[in-house]
């Protein structure tokens, strides 16, 4: 059976979280604590390729259904390449984008129309900007062709300016890291928030759980995220 839920446009001001499941699991008790603290959506990761080390703990249908049943809307983001700095180019963008779409469709059974994010950060210093742009364009093309809504997370060492991101890339959904301010002219739809051990955004029931908070907004063109709502 396909995932339950409905593809919807997100409202502004909604609190959610993103987390990597390496060594940790979202339990019913943890989900309840986060829901009680006001969290209403979740972003989980998909791998870059079949041989990636993250494959064992990246999002699959069973966990996706559990998150939906626990009351969280759902979107996905693909892991960035860690070298620790990596070099993007067009063919890599095509391969990674195609794999993200395939995983979303086959392993998660995510319906079309939901946001699938590219994670652009930690790009090697000196990488030609056109290579970064070509990577993003190729990735976007694969994900869009699969029927999903391509988004981009921009973080530390993305190596592009906010103006370049808005003018040279076709993404309609922009997610900004907690420690960056890109000043994208079209605005952003999601802002990450750093959550420390003592942060008021960390409920008592989430002690030791590694996650970051995120809050939705409507961008300057009146656009918003698209997620699978429970």
Image (cartoon, grey):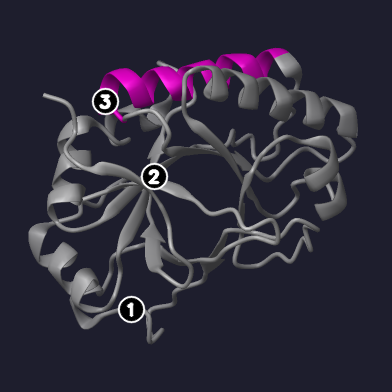
Q: Residue at x 67, y 39 (%)?
A: 171
Q: Compared to 195, does 67 lie above or below?
A: above
Mark 1 residue element: loop
Using the rendered image of the protein, determine whether residue 48 is visible from the camera's viewpoint.
Answer: yes
Magenta region: which residues?
Answer: 91-110
Q: Position of residue 100 (x, y in %)?
A: 46, 25
Checking the image for residue 105, the label placed there is: none
**Relative horizontal placement of residue 43, taking residue 168 as reference (left or right):** left
Residue beneath disc 1: 202
Nearer-the-camera pick, 81 or 94: 94
**Which quarter of the picture shows residue 63?**
top left
Q: Residue at x 22, y 40 (%)?
A: 64
Label 3 neighbour load within 10 Å: few <14, some 14-19, many 20+? some
Residue beneath disc 3: 109
Residue beneath disc 2: 75
N-term-proximal mark, 3 vs 2? 2
């Amino acid at each position: 059976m396909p995932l339950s839920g409905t593809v919807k446009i997100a409202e502004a001001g909604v609190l959610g979280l993103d987390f990597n499941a390496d060594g940790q699991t979202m339990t019913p008790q943890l989900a309840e604590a986060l829901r009680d603290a006001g969290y209403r959506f979740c972003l989980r990761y998909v791998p870059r390729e079949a041989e990636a080390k993250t494959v064992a703990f990246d999002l699959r249908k069973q966990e996706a259904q559990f998150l939906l049943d626990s009351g969280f809307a759902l979107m996905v983001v693909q892991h960035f390449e860690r070298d620790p700095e990596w070099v993007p180019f067009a063919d890599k963008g095509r391969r990674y984008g195609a794999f993200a779409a395939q995983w979303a469709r086959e392993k998660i059974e995510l319906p079309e129309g939901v946001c699938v994010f590219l994670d652009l950060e930690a790009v090697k210093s000196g990488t030609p900007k056109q290579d970064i742009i070509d990577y993003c364009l190729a990735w976007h093309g694969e994900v869009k062709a699969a029927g999903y809504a391509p988004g981009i997370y921009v973080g530390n060492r993305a190596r592009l300016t906010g103006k370049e991101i808005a003018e040279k890339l076709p993404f309609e959904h922009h997610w900004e890291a907690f420690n960056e301010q890109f000043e994208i002219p079209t605005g952003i739809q999601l802002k990450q928030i750093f959550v420390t051990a003592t942060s008021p955004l960390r409920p008592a029931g989430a002690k030791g759980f590694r996650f970051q908070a995120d809050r939705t907004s409507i961008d300057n063109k009146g656009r918003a995220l698209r997620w699978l709502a429970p």
